[in-house]
Amino acid sequence: MKQLFNGQYPELVLFDLDGTLIDSVPDLAAAVDTMLVALEREPVGVEHVRHWVGNGAPMLVKRALTGEQEPDERALDEALFEQAFALFMDAYGNNAAHSSELYPGVIDCLEGLQSQGVRMGLVTNKPIRFTHPLLDEFGLSGFFDVVLGGDSLPVKKPDPGQLLHAMQELGVKPENTLMVGDSRNDIGAAKAAGCPVVAVPYGYNHGEPVEQSQPDLIVDQLDQLVC
């Protein structure tokens, strides 16, 4: 990480959540399947949901309803979507941390950055109503000076708006900020915001190798950032 900042730590590191800090797909998949069964449809399971995560809850529901990575939103029945979305939000809200787990190296990374005086923020496309409880559940809340969910602003990643808002709130320039994520959404948002970006290869990137999106650096696990 320091090689991206002339041998120094950045002033601010912004983290994605799902697929970067927490493996949340088991609980997301369970909520999707609960929703589909309630609609008298076949459940889809973890592997499909793993490829559908990353663009926020509404898009996850649309993908589950259509079975398509890029659903035709104009052809989707609005009443069906609203019913499905409510079912999903209820199911996930009841079990958001049942089977989710922290990835290896996460705590060591956050503690290491904190010990160096690096400020940290969380920028996720997950609805904010689920974000804070997950952070609390896994003991992560105290690390972050700013937390933005997918519905905290009118835009979400890959739009750079969340990242720029976090930087502005903490008074840090893009060139002194690092984004850390697992997908093309994180990488695209960072590039558009003008800050370097590190990616992990183990997360959710719609079935694509994360190196295809050309992050500045790839690390196998996050504690490598503070070695």
Image: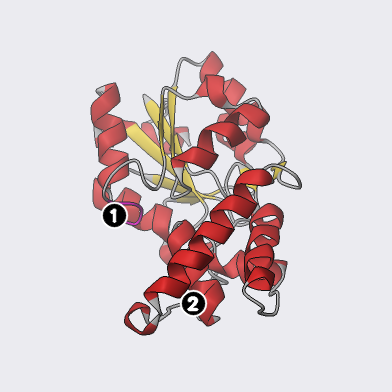
Residue drawn at x 53%, y 69% as measured from the top left? 206
Which labelled disc corresponds to residue 85?
Answer: none
Give the percent coordinates (x, y) of residue 80. 47, 74
Dot 2 amino acid type: Gln
- What's under tag 1, amino acid-wise? Asp
Label 1 sits on residue: 159
**Residue 24 in view (yes/no):** yes
Instruction: Compare marks 2 and 1 and give the one earlier in the sequence.
Output: 2
Residue 172 visible at all? no
Identify the residue shown where x is 36% and y is 53%.
Answer: 157
Q: Position of residue 70 (x, y in %)?
A: 43, 78
Q: Residue at x 69, y 72 (%)?
A: 37
Residue pointed to by mark 2: 69
Q: Residue furthest right?
A: 99
Q: Are marks 2 and 1 in contact (CB under 8 Å)?
A: no
> Image height check: is 217 above or below 50?
above
Stretch of the chain drawn in magenta: 155-159
Q: Is disc 1 surrounded by few (<14), some (14 to 19) or many (20+) residues within 10 Å?
A: some
Q: Nearer the viewer, residue 224 or 101?
A: 101
User: Residue at point 43% right, 79% down?
Assistant: 71
Check the picture and name the quadrant holding the C terminus: top right
